[in-house]
Image (cartoon, rainbow, N blue to C red):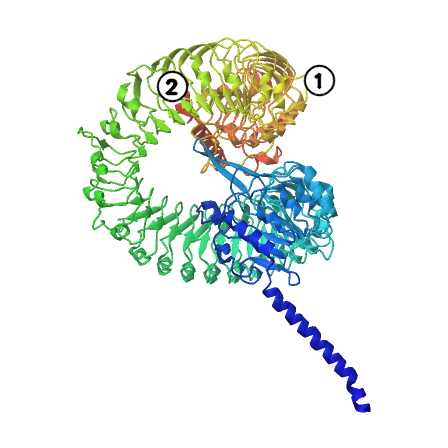
Amino acid sequence: MWKMNQYLPLFLIASCLFFISHSQTISNTSSQHRCLLDQSSALLQLRKEFVEKRIYYDEYDLFDYYNGSYPKMKSWKADSDCCSNWDGVTCDAHNGHVIGLDLSKSWLCGPLKSNSSLFRLHHLRKLNLALNNFSSFTTIPSEFGQLVRLTHLNLSRSFLHGRIPSEISWLSNLVSLDLSFNYFQYFVAADYHYKFLKLRRIDLEALVQNVTYLRELHLDDVDLPWSLPQSLANLSSLTSLSLSWCILLGEFPSDIFLLPKIQAIDVSGNNNLTGFLPNFRSGSSLKQLRLSSTNFSGELPNAIGNLKSLNFLDLSGTNFSGELPESIGNLKSLSHLDLSGANFFGELPNSIGKLESLNALYLRSTNFSGKLPDSIGNLNSLNYLELDLSKFSGEIPPSIGNLSQLTYLSLYWNNFNGQLPSTLGNLAKLTSLDLGYNLFFGKVPSSLGNLTQLEELFLPYNNFEGRFPVSLTNITKLTRIGISGNQLKGSIPSEISKLTNLSLLALSYNSLTGAIPLVLYTMPSLSELILNQNQLTGPLQFQNISSSQLNILGLSGNKLDGPVPRSIANFTKLRELYLSSINLKDKMELNIFFQVKELQYLDLSGNNLLVSKENINSTHPKISYLLLSSCNLREFPDFLKAQNELNTLDLSNNKIEGKIPKWFCNVGKGTLQYLNLSFNLLSGFEQPLKVLPWKFIIYLDLRSNMLQGSLPIPPLSTSYFFASNNNLTGKIPQMICKVNSLQVLDISNNQLIGQIPQCFGHFSNSLLVLNMRNNCFQGNLPKSFMKGCSLVTLDLSHNQIQGKIPRSLAQCRMLEVLNLGNNNINDAFPFWLQSLPELRILVLRTNGFHGPIWTPHTSFGFSKLHVIDLSHNNFFGRLPSECFKTWNAMLMVPTKDYSQPEYMGSQFNYYEDSMTIVNKGLEIFLVKILTIFTAIDLSNNRFYGEIPNSVGNLKGLILLNLSSNSFIGHVPSSLGNLTSLESLDLSQNKLSGEIPQQLIGLTFLEYLNLSHNQLIGPIPQGGQFWTFEISTFEGNLALCGSPLPKKCGIEPPTYETRQESSIVEGFDWKVIVIGYACGLMIGLVIGHFATSRTDWFVRNF
């Protein structure tokens, strides 16, 4: 008995455990088979509300829409249990209520209705309807607010739109809310339009106040056009906040970054959202930070290194600046770093090599400079390295060969130099390599042949030399090779044929010689063969090409022989053919190319073209891009009559004369966007037209012909219109005011009369260039230039314009060139022009301007001014020394690179600025203006007083003309600091004293005129002074020494004198010739000359 009592407690415990276990089993069993009737009824009714079908939209692919999708409701049968057999349904194990419904990716199509049976499922806790198609004109029903037990609601990517109901804020138990990436797409007049979800700020504030346990808030692509409430920072449980592309405004609450549980923040794509990064605390749980395409700014705080859990950082397209802190190396978990398009500068810190988990590094379009640190080779996990369009320099560190996992390497368009390290051949997994547009030189290393996985190789526009690297032909996976713009020599190796996967071979702009290997035309995968601008020779031969895959063939600018063979018609897939300037001795027959049936782009410019008369054939290929410039054409080719799909047509630089035929106005009437008829002998249109007929034209060039009559009006679509250098007469038709899409209008050098239309000031918000130079326009300038004026160039010189310069021109804040020279303007100096921050060229010469060019109250500007010409006016007064101190563009000596010259106005397509200026004693018309050209011409006015010493600070100055004024005092010795000066004219003044010896140091000085002053003493001997003639110094009776016949009392040795300026030391004739040659180069590059003093020019040049 005692023993029974001894085991009784154990028996009772065992019995209890058995009972509990048995009860649980019974409960589980019953829950698996118990589906409440009202729940299954609601679900079956819900199924009837939608159609289940796949909708094929490209947009779906963005969301991986169909990966794993299927019609889940098909498993919903009335005779089965909804809790155990129905896909996507989860029930409460105790009472059978439906508490979870996951119908994501279920092919649901149709509207979410307010009376949907979905809202009868009052016990729902988790609801996921993402990735369906609820697209309609209905909005999210407010009845969602009845599902008060919801903890998770996901309606993302389901094509919803309209206002998010305020009742969503009633869901106080929500832990996760995802309404992201919804929109409704519709068509109006064949154009796409979109409607997005919208959320009122007051409703977000209510949501934040009521839903205090929220951990995930995802509202991407929801319209939130206001500033975020600070109360968001009160969501202490928040782990993920995603608000990308929401049109957010204002400043992002920085305290959100410091929330204790925050792991992911994404506000990318909100261009007007400002903010800065706080000092992150140690122990932060932040893992992902996406701020791309926002207006965040400031420097990256050193405390960024505290984000030890951060694995994804995207600051691309922001305004962050400063240097990258060394602490960036503390982010040991970082796998993705994107700083592209931000304003970071300086060198990459060595600590970048400590990011041992880094998989992708994007530094595209930044201001990073200097060498890549050797530590870059420590990034052993790196797959993707992109440094394009930045300012890195120096050699590629050999350590880059340690990046054994690298698959993509792009250093495109930097300042890298030196030879490529052979260690690049160690990157065994590399599939794409782009080193284009740098300064690399030497031979392409043969070690690149070790990159057996390489598919793309781009080395264009460097200074690589030697032969085509044959080792590349061993990389059988290569699909694209681009080595254009280098100094490769020798022949193209036939071994390229081993690259059976090659689709692109681009070797243009090299010095390749020899014949083109015929095998290139028949390679099985080659679709683009671009060999333009080499020295390839031999006859054109196309044999056995019927199976050729070529789509694009470029052979322009070579030295090919013989006629174009008729077998070219056997290129059955050729769409683009470029054969300009190929140096054929025979005439090129145009009709041959009509046999290439798929041809769409054809460039035969620079050849002697034979166009035979034949019947118009409708079977000719429909060409969209046709360039026949400089082909010795004498009439419009008849075959154009059948070309009704032309987009681009260039017939410039031919000898087509007479009137433009009536039929030509129908060529490409509904398709043509680019038409160039310039530099011919055209006199007008056979059929008078008020408006030219090409209704979609964007670029129309009629310049340098013999057009007569009134100005032809371009179609309303025109952006670029050139009619300069013709014989057009009469007034500008008022109809031109309707062409308000114009960006460039050049009607210079005609005989047009009348007033300048006032409307030119009204659509100046689109007009960038207005050139009406050298006509006969009269009257006043347009009175009103609109706010937001976009004018960059305004040239009205050489007309008969009167009156004053309108103050409204100050609205044109982007104005770079203002040329009003050679008119009849009667005005004081326009001081307010100094407020134009971009002004580079100011020409007011030969007008009736008067008065001083400064006052004691003047605020000096002109910080970007390169050229100022105020000559031949009635300006008077002293020159203030202060004004030159702010002319920053002239203070620095520019880098002169004649191999790649840049010109004023070249930022516009098809247009470059020009001007007339007196340079080196000659009136010169500069067809182009080098951006490094700087000039001050204040000649032929009534300035007096001394020449200020501060002019000597303008070290970038090339031309200085202060002649024909009343300046007194000494020639400033500070002029010796103007080391770039090529032309100095101080003649016809009242200058006195000796010529300063410092001027000997002006080694580029090619023209000097000090005549007709009151100078005394010996002429400096040495340097460029040895090259000047007597006329340079005549009219100064007290001057002596060579080249004047008057000898000084004691003439010092011409080149032995050491006690003068030390700058004279070391000069010999080599220096003089160098200076002389460089000065000549400036003259030759920037323009051609229009002058009657031809003999002088020939003698001196």
Q: Position of residue 275 (x, y in %)?
A: 68, 41
Is 335 placed left or right of 530 in the picture? right
Q: Which mark is residue 230?
A: none
Q: Position of residue 633 (x, y in %)?
A: 25, 27
Q: Position of residue 1000 (x, y in %)?
A: 56, 30
Residue nearer the viewer, 566 or 516: 566
**Amino acid type of the residue that numbered disc 1 sits on in the rendered structure:** Pro
Residue nearer the viewer, 225 or 993: 225
Q: Which mark is first along the chain, 2 or 1? A: 2
Q: Residue drawn 31% across and 32% down?
A: 645
Q: Quadrant of the C terminus?
A: top left
Decide: few, some or many residues near mark 2? Use Cα within 10 Å; few <14, some 14-19, many ≥20.
many
- Residue 358 in sight: no
Q: Which mark is residue 856?
A: 1
Residue nearer the viewer, 253 or 558: 253
Q: Please tell me whether residue 84 is drawn above or below residue 276 in the rendered image.
A: below
Q: Secondary structure at mark 2?
A: loop
**Amino acid type of the residue that numbered disc 2 sits on in the rendered structure:** Asn
Q: Are marks 1 and 2 in contact (CB under 8 Å)?
A: no
Is 673 placed left or right of 979 in the picture? left
Which residue is label 2 attached to? 725
Q: Position of residue 886 (x, y in %)?
A: 64, 27
Q: Secondary structure at mark 1?
A: loop
Q: Please tell me whether residue 980 is drawn above or below residue 551 in the rendered image.
A: above
Count up the numbered dots.
2
